[in-house]
Amino acid sequence: MKNYKTLLEENRAWAEEAFAKIDEKMQRVTLRSRDKIADGVKDGVHVSRAPNTWTAGFWGGLNYLLYEYTKNEEYLKTAKRSEELMDAALMNFTKLHHDVGFMWHILSGAGYRITGDEKSRVRNFFAATTLASRFVLTENGGFIRAWNDKWGGKEVDGWSIIDCLMNLPLLYWASREIGDDRFTRIAMEHADMALCDHLREDGSIAHIVEHDRTTGELVTTYGGQGIAEGSSWSRGQAWGLYGFTLSYIHTGEERYLDAAKLVANYFISNCSDDWLPRVDFRAPAEPVYYDSTAGAIAACGLIELAKRLPEGEGGLYMNAAVNILKALYNNFMNFDPDTDDMLGYGTVRYPCDGDEKKAGVHISIIYGDYFFTEAILKMLGSEFLPW
């Protein structure tokens, strides 16, 4: 196996080609969608979502990624406009949830680190304190509550989901920024809970966990966006892979690195036939439902994981990231500058009820575009980590 630096060098020309196509397309799209909170497309045109939607930060975040690398002011204008549109959600506290990291850290947090804008810094602190306020202290640690309302008629006051690992960098940032570890303590309590309750011995992930709010003990798990309880939703695997890697990056704690490697090995072994992840790794072979977003997210995590390991060991994960990205590039990308969608074949959840349209099967999803672009920039040597 080649080491990760060699793999980066050998694939740089391909990554440059991929980014040139992204940039050419996005120079047009950023102008057309400047006044939207863009998420998904209809008839080739971005749909605008409500500012309290969990995906609302990805459009502006994507533009900050592009601005940081290219210094094209048009991307900066769109990113700043996206922050302004999101301000309405900050004042609507009852509608906020654990995904405020997705909503603001890659948007305002990135904006502050790139431009030094104090307004962006304050927005990110609002988000961090909101996330910290969701921590449920139990007799054996604690967890960050995911949602506010009922889910499928069930009470959710004891629920955590694997996705929240990706929101923890917001808390790590807040502690560093103010020199107070209280945010990091909450983040690590949640990450340690995920090690015990979401991560299975084989490296697969339980999407949703219900906890006893007094003891913190695991009550049961739910299939969530996978096919059933006990299944292996591929995007949940990707959240776990990248999320544990990020907790290692921010804390240096080896247990998170070990967890990331375990999840990565499981992910690789389940999609290495053609490097196109199915929606659930434990679903029947037919029909085939892909989720390109799981591949793009996992590729980001695999690259960051490879960089933190000895070159030889890191080569295994870098090789997988390259294979996934090339598979997505060759099968699912749309670089037509006259349409707003880019990465296709994303899937919101496994269509357990047989309703593929309701489940969002094989569609363009904004976070697919975001993570694919983030991964390509990593391939080009960008050291900017938005998380």
Image: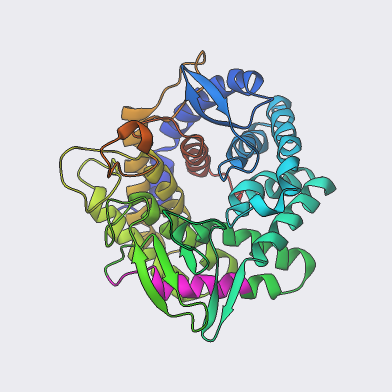
Residue furthest to the left in view is 285
Residue 251 is situated, as x and y percent measured from the top left of the image, at: 58, 71
Q: Is 328 above or below relative to 336?
A: below
Residue 373 is situated, as x and y percent measured from the top left of the image, at: 51, 36
Q: Nearer the viewer, residue 272 or 87?
A: 87
Tell me if residue 91 is in the magenta stretch: no
The answer to which quarter of the image holds residue 332 is: top left
Q: From where the camera sits, is residue 8 visible?
A: yes
Quarter in which the N terminus is drawn: bottom left
Q: Magenta stretch: give its range.
A: 186-201
Question: Which residue does the image show at 48% across and 21% down from the upper left?
Answer: 42
Q: Main secondary structure of the magenta part?
A: helix
Residue 155 is situated, as x and y percent measured from the top left of the image, at: 48, 63
Residue 249 is situated, as x and y percent measured from the top left of the image, at: 55, 64
The answer to which quarter of the image holds residue 182 is: bottom right
Tell me if residue 196 is in the magenta stretch: yes
Question: Which residue does the image show at 31% across and 65% down from the upper left?
Answer: 203
